[in-house]
Image: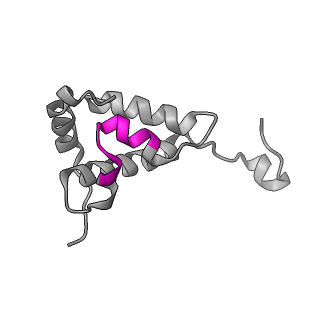
Amino acid sequence: MAAAAMPLEELERWLQARVDRQPIATSLAMLDGYVAAIVAGPVSMSPLDWICPLLAIDADAFNHGDTPEFAAIFAVALRHNDISNVLRPRPTSSSRCTGANPW
């Protein structure tokens, strides 16, 4: 069976239920802020380096596609992509014509 991303409402409940494990994010708002910082940060980070503490999971969770942890990882990856698409600079019409960077 293919792994599916955890729906955001379920992810919110899942995060709140893990408070005793001390994840960085205990709500979707915190998760979004953390992911936005990862996206906008000056350096790239391995997903293992930021998703594991974000969700308070072991790196081995990436290897098991049929678990709630993996469904949460998948949801975070999709959320990362959504936030990245929002924050990504859009080319201006002049930069498309000249190839110049607008800033």
| Above or below: residue 30 compared with residue 43 | above
80 left or right, relative to 94: left
The percent position of residue 92, horizontal first and vertical second, equals: 71, 45
Quarter of the image that includes the C terminus: top right
Task: Find out whether residue 75 is within the magenta segment.
Answer: no
Location of the N terminus by quadrant is: bottom left
Q: Work out whether 32 lies above or below 10.
A: above
Residue at horizontal 25%, vertical 28%? 26
Considering depth in this image, is 5 or 93 the residue closer to the camera? 5
Start-end of magenta stretch? 49-60
Identify the residue shown where x is 42% and y is 31%: 34
Residue 22 percent location from the top left of the image: 26, 27
Q: Position of residue 29 (x, y in %)?
A: 32, 28
Quadrant of res 3: bottom left
Examine the rendered structure and indicate whether residue 8 appears above or below residue 97: above
**Residue 33's spot in the image, x, y percent?**
41, 29
* Count of numbered circles on the image: 0
**Colouring used for the render:** one colour
| Image quadrant where residue 30 sits | top left
Question: Between 81 and 99, which is closer to the camera in this rendering?
Answer: 81
Left or right of 51: which side holds 43? right
- Magenta region, main secondary structure: helix
